[in-house]
Image (cartoon, rainbow, N blue to C red):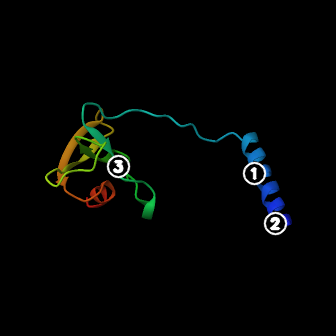
Amino acid sequence: MLFARLCVLVACLLTIRAGFAEKPAWKLEVEQITRGAKHHFFGYIGQCQTIPWSFDGRYLLAMEIDEIARMPEANESATICLIGTEDQNKMLRIDRTKACNPQQGTMSF
């Protein structure tokens, strides 16, 4: 048991050391694309290859709500939006949803 733990520790240390020696081949840039008092988000990324971008990269799928710091009330709905990345991030509000959570809301589109 001690030998197995020692092997795991050595493997972790080698992995960490190798990670510091390599530089990533890509550069990450962050840009805010929505503005205003409302909150904009996409439910989640990755499950079943769910991504918020259209195939051609022109549109970004998002939800718009008034308040993100609490659960929505029964009478509230979220707006499903497309953000035009080639049109100065113009917000196209296309539908509304009363899905019970943000993940289901963006998946319903």
Real-space CA distance between mark 1 and mark 2, rounded to the nearest whole angstrom = 17 Å
Task: Return the residue at label 2.
Answer: 4
Residue at the far bottom in the pictured view: 1
Image quadrant of residue 10? Answer: bottom right
Is the Cβ of the residue at disc 1 closer than 8 Å to that at disc 2?
A: no
Residue 15's label in the rendered image is: 1
Q: Amino acid at mark 2?
A: Ala
40 sits to left or right of 44? left
User: Which residue is located at x 46 percent, y 57 percent?
Assistant: 46
Query: Split into 4 quadrants, where in the image is the N terminus?
Result: bottom right
Query: Type of residue at label 3?
Result: Phe
All told, the count of numbered labels is 3
Question: What amino acid is labelled 1 in the image?
Answer: Thr
Q: Which residue is identified by label 3?
A: 42
Q: Nearer the viewer, residue 79 or 25?
A: 79
Label 1 or label 3, whichever comes before in sequence order: 1
Residue 28 in the image: state x and y as whole percent.
Answer: 53, 37
Calculate the distance from the C-alpha at mark 1 to the C-alpha at mark 3.
Answer: 33 Å
Quarter assignment of residue 97: bottom left
Q: Locate residue 1 relative to residue 81 in the image: left or right.
A: right
Q: Taking 74 as reference, is 86 left or right?
A: right
SS state under label 1: helix
